[in-house]
Image (spheres, grey):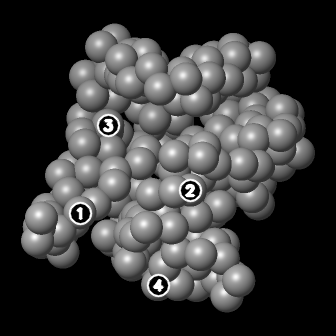
């Protein structure tokens, strides 16, 4: 009694179109809360900033192009993979390898029916924007859109190439099967399997371990510290 109370709920940004719901326990916790705290506090504002921040952090410097960073084999694989999700290499060649990796992952997921509109963070955020919805009307971010884009894309070149190689190491069917397995584990609350799938590449490649430390675990620690300070 008298101590601050908080509910911690893991998020999943892309889910199947049929997953447009939240568990009853999650909704009850939300409705009992005073404020919603997520990675980004205002998803709509972050979306509006995306193009500017992509130009700031996701574009290669000067006249550098993707062809300058990748060997012929990796470049050919990248071109084929981009084509499979409806993108051409030429207009993408000014983006960093880390951006290409995300574009491929999201493109493959979209083709397979995964959407952001049923993402857990999006569903909670929309409840804060609905005056008729019980629960908090305020959403606070644990990081800014600028911080997030910088963490994801302004990373050492070796890590960028490593994450692109990892994205290209699986066929499209294999990538979707892995994403589906990850989502299914999340839905059944199997945290052990979620971690196993997430860290699979890191066990095989030290560069991917460094990448996960930078874009996942490091960010999580920083956000946890900010969250504790709010209590």
Is label 4 in a helix, a strand or a loop? loop
Quadrant for the C terminus, please: bottom left
Q: Which residue is mark 1?
A: 5
Q: In the image, residue 52 lies at what x, y percent?
A: 57, 83
Q: Which residue is mark 4?
A: 138
CA gap between label 3 and label 1 equals 30 Å
Give the mark count: 4
Of the image marks 1 and 4, the number of the one nearer the N terminus: 1
Q: Which residue is mark 3?
A: 212
CA gap between label 4 and label 3 equals 30 Å
- The mark closer to the camera, 4 or 3, is 4
- The mark closer to the camera, 1 or 4, is 1
Of the image marks 4 and 3, the number of the one nearer the N terminus: 4
User: Would you call the spot at circle 1 few (<14 residues within 10 Å), some (14-19), or many (20 or more)?
Assistant: few
Q: In the image, residue 216 lies at what x, y percent?
A: 32, 44
Q: Which residue is mark 2?
A: 27
């Amino acid at each position: 009694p008298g101590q601050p109370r908080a509910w911690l709920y893991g998020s999943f940004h892309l889910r199947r179109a049929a997953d447009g719901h939240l568990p009853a326990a999650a909704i009850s916790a939300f409705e009992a809360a005073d404020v919603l705290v997520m990675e980004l506090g205002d998803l709509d504002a972050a979306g509006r900033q995306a193009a500017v921040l992509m130009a700031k952090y996701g574009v290669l410097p000067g006249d550098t192009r993707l062809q300058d960073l990748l060997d012929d084999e990796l470049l050919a694989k990248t071109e084929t993979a981009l084509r499979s999700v409806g993108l051409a290499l030429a207009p993408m060649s000014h983006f960093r390898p880390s951006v290409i990796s995300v574009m491929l992952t999201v493109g493959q997921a979209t083709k397979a029916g995964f959407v952001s509109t049923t993402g857990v963070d999006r569903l909670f955020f929309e409840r804060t924007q609905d005056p008729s919805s019980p629960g908090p009307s305020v959403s606070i971010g644990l990081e800014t859109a600028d911080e997030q884009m910088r963490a994801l894309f302004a990373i050492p070149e070796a890590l960028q190439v490593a994450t692109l190689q990892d994205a290209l190491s699986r066929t499209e069917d294999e990538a979707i099967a892995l994403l589906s397995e990850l989502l299914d584990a999340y839905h059944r609350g199997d945290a052990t399997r979620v971690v196993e799938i997430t860290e699979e590449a890191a066990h095989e490649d030290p560069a991917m371990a460094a990448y996960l430390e930078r874009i996942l675990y490091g960010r999580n620690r920083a956000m946890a510290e900010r969250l504790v300070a709010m209590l």
